[in-house]
Image (tube, grey):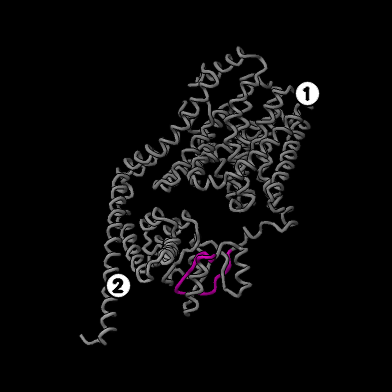
Amino acid sequence: MQGEGFFFQAFVYLSAAVISVPVAKRLGLGSVLGYLIAGFIIGPFGFQLIGEEGQDVMHFAEFGVVMMLFLIGLELRPSLLWRLRGPILGMGGLQVGLTIAALTSVGMFFGLSLQASLAVGMTLALSSTAIVLQTLNEKRLMKTDAGQSAFSVLLFQDIAVIPMLAIMPILAVKGVDAVKEAGESHAGSTTWVEGFSGWGQALIVVGVISFIIIAGLFLIRPFFRYVAKTRLRELFTAASLLLVIGISLLMTKVGLSPALGTFLAGVVLANSEYRHELEGDIEPFKGLLLGLFFIAVGASIDFGLITAKPGLIGTLVVGLIAIKFIILLIVGKIFKIKHDQNILFAFSLAQGGEFAFVLFSFALQNHVISNAVASPLIAAVAISMALTPLVLILNDKLIQPRFGTHEQEEKEADGIDEENSVIIAGFGNFGSIVGRLLRANNVGITVLEHDSDRVELLRKLGLKVFYGDVSRQDLLHAAGAEKARILILAFNDHGKTLDIVRMVRKYYPHLIIFTRSSGRTEIFELHEGGVHHVYRETFETSLKLGIDALTTLGFRSYQAQRVTKTFRHYDIEATHMLRHARHDKKSYISISRQRIEDLEQLMLSDLRKIEEDIDTAWDTSYVMKEFGGKI
């Protein structure tokens, strides 16, 4: 009977999603709002198809958020994360700090204690990572200023959950004994940090985070290499899920957010050769569990409380959205976000977040706030989350048109009315040089550029450029890929380049691909993807600089040119050799060291030969001059 109950619940959730989401998409509401509506329909105030199991499903579905953070981490190389440190710490820190201060003041104004007000302020300062990122991705707004700013703030908020969870027991108003008792009654669960002092808990937490980073660098890659050798796709999928679940359990055991742990693991593995396989294996589970999470949110809204106290709940929802909206506008203004993008940024983050359910539950267990305070706030958070897709739609339809919207980001690709032997994707500083050289030699090219501002500028300069994203197979088809001979990928986005290469190899295997790279690692990945013409964008310029440096130091021009030509040939040869050893670190280092030593010996030998040739040439010239060519 229990099995039948499980299958019935699964049938209900899947049916609700399959019916509601396509309808919502057709009506222009987006998939997130479709899932939330599905949850309402099958919930206690709909057809009552789910009962107490809804909360259990919520805990299970929250794992979708964990998987989403893991995939986000995979997209963020440590270098990119370091570049974003300003927006993450600046915008994120300012938003969280100002919101906590404002909401704490409001709580105290309405009679809550400082501890309870601070707990409420911290909890409501967070926004919904799942809903915001899903909605912005669907609308193709993640690459806009608003999308990047929202992502930075959400990332800081997810990290901020850790200190918030640590602070919550300190705010307990019933003393240490009550906190201890509440902790022991928490579903019978225990953590590894219980019973330790504050310093002890901090050391354990730092140790676990350090272990995740070190394991990601030195243990997980060999593990996946071992699994990959089996050539069983299902085993690799199982290993991917094992990694995410294992890290989640580890973070839970030290009282931290599982989402943060998986995010860190994703960042560590962002440069791994298995990144794309991990993304492909986790993505379906992430999408399904996120959908389940949104349905559970829709079903968990306490409509009994809402109908009993509509004025209170409505005031809380409007007040929460209004306060966060104003603070976000101020933050965006400080960081000089353009007005239309700033409005989108503020609207996208003005709701409560999924971590509010966790933090309010934690605050209740530690007796920081009472149930009378938590219940209406939880309902307000759920409603604010449900309203987010609708608010963004209203922003698109009513508000953005007044401010010169982000229409450029969403406009349709141009119709392409020509077919040429060469297609160039990306017409920035790199691509424009290649394109102008080909056109100057009467070679027909079709240029595709995804930056609408650049397209307008290039057209004003008299260049024929089409707006569109070359990663779309239909657009590449329209550009004449079936009849073209060469595809030049000239933009500086390695991940996107790899994705396009895979797509081109699948649909247009006859195309010869030329592309750029920034280093050997990228060259290796592109060669494995099927690209044979890869150019290191700084390589030739570096060699030219080296020639000029040598001549400035007194080398003859002929010497500098010849040794540089030798170096160039030897380096390209070494790159091909190292490509086959890239997965064996020991062998890679050994070959690299040997090649460096060999190159130094070769260059010394070459220099001696050049000097001998020059001396011989000078002696011959001297004899010819002295004896008039008669010896």
- Where's the C terminus, which quadrant? bottom left
User: Can you give x and y, in whole percent of width and height, for residue 254 in the image?
Assistant: 50, 25
Which region of the structure is painted magenta?
A: 413-430
Whether residue 359 is visible to the viewer of this picture, yes or no, is yes
Helix, strand, or loop for circle 1? loop
**Amino acid type for the residue under numbered disc 2:** Ile
**Relative to 277, does residue 511 appear above or below in the rendering?**
below
The residue lying toward the viewer, choosing from 263 and 584, is: 584
Q: Which residue is mark 1?
A: 111
The residue lying toward the viewer, choosing from 617 and 290, is: 617
The residue lying toward the viewer, choosing from 135 and 90, is: 90
User: Can you give x and y, in whole percent of width and height, for residue 99 in the image?
Assistant: 70, 36
Dominant secondary structure of the residues highlighted in magenta in the image: loop
Q: Is residue 422 magenta?
A: yes
Whether residue 507 is visible to the viewer of this picture, yes or no, is no
User: Can you give x and y, in whole percent of width and height, for residue 89 in the image?
Assistant: 61, 40
Q: CA distance from mark 1 to mark 2?
A: 93 Å
**Relative to 83, does residue 519 appear above or below in the rendering?**
below
Q: Which residue is mark 2?
A: 614
